[in-house]
Amino acid sequence: MVDYSSNQIYNVVLLGHGSSGKTTLSEAVLYTAGATKRAGKISDGNTVSDFDQEEINRHISIKLSVLPFGWNDKKVNMLDTPGYADFVGETREGIRVADSGLVLMDAVSGVEVGTELVWAASDERNLPRFLVINKMDRENADFQRSLSQAQEIFGSAILPLLLPIGKDDNFRGVIDVVRMKAYMGPDAAEEDIPADLQNDAEAARLQLVETAVEQDDDLMMKYLEGEELSPEEILKAVRSAVAKGALVPVIAASGETGVGLRPMIQAVVDYSPSAAEHKEVAKTLAGDEVTLEPNPSGPLAALAFKTTADPFVGKLTYLRVYSGILHSDSRVYNPRTRNEERIGQLFTVRGKDQTPVESITPGDIGAVAKLSSTITGDTLCDRDNQIILEGISFPAPIYSVAVYPRGKGDSAKLGSSLSRLVEEDPTLQWHQEPSTRETILSGMGDMHLLIAVKYLENKFGVSVETKEPKVPYLETITKTARAQYRHKKQTGGAGQFAEVHLRVEPLPRGGGFEYLNEVFGGAISSAFIPSIEKGIKQVLSQGVLAGFPVVDVKAAVYDGKEHPVDSKDIAFQIAGREAFKKAVLEASPVLLEPIMNVRIVVPGNFMGDVLGDLNTRRARIQGMEQEKGKSIITAQVPLAEMQRYATDLRSITQGRGVYTMELSHYAVVPTHIANEVIEKLKKEQEES
């Protein structure tokens, strides 16, 4: 096993729209670098990165995969990410620990929805990147059209580094415009630039060099004075411009044929920052910022950036070390849990294959099994030098289903299995909704939850059915009302007697429940006052109108009667319950529905369609603005109208719209809609 220092390690994340060719290209790169003996195929289900059974079945990437390989004296940790928007959490994990990115574009399709989404996510972290115009061997592949489209959408600093020689079936090589050499075929045989492409290569070189030297004042002066720059100076300038985000080099390649891959890998190690150049800003327990160098003798700081839950092996935690050295068979400290973790055997991971190692050096990526309490986003450090690394920003779930266990065995394991799912994928969340008595599983879309349910069954042996969640309505009253109820039960033996007079009043929204004892003169003994409250609280949870919790109400007991022998706790519970029900029905009860704050970001040309659709959803538009060429709509919309909005918005905007949603407040449901809800629920109860 070769030991690499941080200046020899490159952490590169593969990003792009689904079907842009990331997995095929990663297979070809591993084969080209000699890390595998043959390139796997998605259709055969034998790729290194897509080893999960669901990935094999569906022919798409679902999980982030770590794919290290050696290149001359360097180590490249390639992180293959899913392109499908539902699995954005995996993509964000990869971006968090990468030092640079390869954004793949299909040479036929050009900039797609996923391209824009990963570009924006990379911008959030100022990630240096390359643009790979992939699939140059496809019919109708067009490098120049794809390049122009990318420049128009993402900016003019996107410039060719490896120009294509030929296209479609005739894509046979690339031109390195820095070295001014042609590299032909998958073996990258060095040749002179074809005469008919010489002018194009010189024009591309001029543009690239001028952009790169702008980042270096000394080189800029030398260039302006007409002095010839050495290849080393140009390489240094390009590398510096890439690191600063001032330049995005563009690479022509084909993952299918392997043409352009050797020059592409060389470009990564030539021009992207190594792990040694990464300075990580962390915080102490006191909140002070510290800058961590990738120094082996520095304080230990490792980020748990991915967790996989396996029912047989246990939990596998993926780590990137930013400072210090992480050793096998050692003890580390987790500042979040305030507990020590025992590090057992460390591994380097390639797909599903694990290779034991003694340690992980700064800048490198590895994994460890069976950490007891560490989850994705946690820091591992020394107890004596506690450091907290920035975690991973995950989007909030926007799509939910209610899950129902199929059998008793499934019911017993459901909660713990859902918790393990969420531990593995933080873009999933689950909770028990008390108002509807449903178990709710939330995620990023229908595909995301469909696969989560499959994992429940295949990984944890829990079989469930899913339904659209019920809206968590609430019930309240709108005026003051009085009612009384006498409970009298006389059968053989001891009887039951209680009479309760009470008044209900509405409280302000969010007021909860208040209970008052206004009984004077001993009409009801003080011992029975709590019994009445207990009966009322049964109704609070079960509802009066449609079975939803009753909120924002004051109940005051002001009179009643009791019997010296037959009055007891259960009698006053029943009388309190029934009197409260009667009073609520007299107090003009209404349904309350959750109103959500929604923020929608769409390309400007979809603005009208989105606004028109929102109007059909009883939305109240709060504002509209433009930001970076996008239209941003803020609105308040009833949750009942937003249950399947993730799917609908994708349809309306061709997948280009994104949104976030959080609870704002509860509001009264319009009468005609409330009547429909109540009738529907009564019908369901009768049928069940």
Image (cartoon, grey):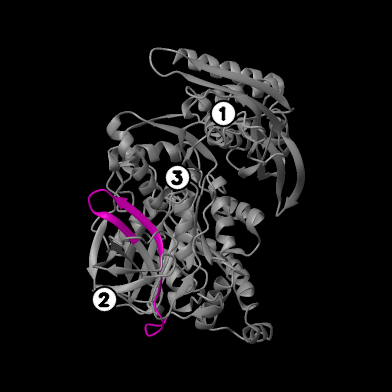
Q: Residue at x 34, y 53 (%)?
A: 308
Whole-percent x, y for residue 157 in the image: 63, 65
Q: CA distance from mark 2 to mark 3?
A: 34 Å
What crowding class fits label 2: few (fewer than 14 Cα within 10 Å), some (14-19), or many (20 or more)? few
Q: Which residues are magenta?
A: 295-317
Q: Amino acid at mark 1?
A: Phe
The residue under label 2 is which amino acid type? Val
Residue, disc 3: 19
Instruction: Tell me if residue 300 is in the magenta stretch.
Output: yes
Determine whether, in the image, residue 317 is placed left or right of residue 194.
left
- Which label lies toward us, 3 or 1? 1
Asked if residue 400 shows in the view, the reply is: yes
Q: Is residue 510 above or below residue 669?
A: below
Residue labelled with disc 1: 548
Residue 344 among magenta residues:
no
Q: Residue at x 63, y 18 (%)?
A: 676
Please, is residue 517 above or below residue 25 in the view? above
The mark found on residue 255 in the picture is none
Gap between marks 3 and 1 measured at Cα: 46 Å
Q: Residues within 10 Å of mark 3 (few under 14, many from 20)?
A: some
Labelled disc at residue 2: 2
